Amino acid sequence: MDKEHLLTTKLIIDGQFHDFQLYSGKFYLWTNKKELKIYNWNKWLTQLAYVDRPIYLEPQPTEQLHVSVDDLAPFLERTLSFSETIYDSALFNHTLYFSDYTGFYRLSLTKKDTERIRIWEQPVYSISLSTAGRMALSAGDAGLYEYLLSTQYYYEQLERQKVVRIFQLSSHFASHTTWDHHNLIQYGKDPVYPAYFIQFNERKGQLHVLDCAPIDSLAKNNLHEQLQEYPLPLSLDKPSMQDGYLFSFEMDRTKIKKNALYRSKSIRLELKSAAANDQRMDFSSSLIVDASSPNFKVTLQNKKLLELPAQDVLKFRIYTRTRNYRNQLHILKEKSLELYIFSEIKR
């Protein structure tokens, strides 16, 4: 895969949002901390095929489109309202897991009239799912925990068990975590720089915590580098020579062929680990997301596809556990939610 045949599609949803997730053909959008709207993702993308916009070919194939929440109204299937402010949420096996100040809950999404079930009385500030189907719970001063989602995994270290199926992994302050296969990178009071690396041994589903070691603080760049997002603050109007910008473009559906639902079998995004060696990662075929440096980057074969200031990224998601959405990167900013879809094109 090279940049000439990699189309970057940028969908910008204007507004201020709390959270988001793409799961099983549905797009879950927290419009605020108490309201969750569920949209039909496939119907929305099918409709987008009929929206006329140019595809820029230089410096690499790109297209972008602005929409609002009102534009998504035809694809709205369900709205869930909550009485308390939600801290964080995650989706697994058609179940919504979420937390507020009263504790950690689950809510089945297969039935409309189902009631929420409290799993634990401890508030959880960040919920992180691994590609292997494990769930880490960051509870601030209370430390870091794991909730066993299924019977596939189990602990024999019963001294770590706090309540049924919840085990403590670390007593250090935990703001959030990222997974490195079966290992965990734990962040403390500084949400940018990792604090601990927790190593596990997993054999036939049995889990053991081997080590929880501090990570040396990464050198902070004191020079504030003003970055413009690369390469996509492009206008949808035809470029003018008077503007000093020379981009070539083609109208959609002329010579460009792409998947109607922007799916890809060969393109996948992977998160570059902030704590471990990435020798096992195939950098030649994957799009690497580097969120640990001062500049948030996406690269292909060490060539930048996207770069923007890390402080602009409030939250981001890639979908390594899915089959159809592994080519997507979703970024939450202060006044917008930006969906990047990387797909193959033929021309």
Image (cartoon, grey):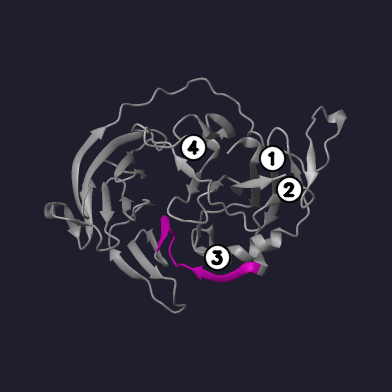
| Mark 3 residue crowding within 10 angstroms, few (<14) / some (14–19) / many (20+) | many
Of tags 3 and 2, the one toward the viewer is 2
The residue to which callout 1 is attached is 61
Of tags 4 and 2, the one toward the viewer is 2
Q: Residue placed at 67% from the left, 38% from the top?
A: 232
The kind of residue tagged 4 is Ile
Q: Which residues are the magenta region?
A: 75-92
Mark-to-mark CA distance, 3 and 4: 30 Å
Mark closest to the chain's N terminus, 3 or 4: 3
Q: Is residue 46 left or right of residue 269?
A: right
Q: Residue placed at 37% from the left, 36% from the top?
A: 280
Of tags 1 and 2, the one toward the viewer is 2
The residue to which callout 2 is attached is 256
The residue to which callout 4 is attached is 288
Mark-to-mark CA distance, 1 and 4: 18 Å
Q: Which structural element holds mark 4?
A: strand
Q: Position of residue 285 (x, y in %)?
A: 50, 39
Mark closest to the chain's N terminus, 1 or 4: 1
* Residue 83 among those drawn in magenta: yes
Q: Decide whether the magenta segment is chiefly helix, strand or loop.
A: strand
Mark-to-mark CA distance, 3 and 1: 32 Å
Mark-to-mark CA distance, 4 and 2: 25 Å
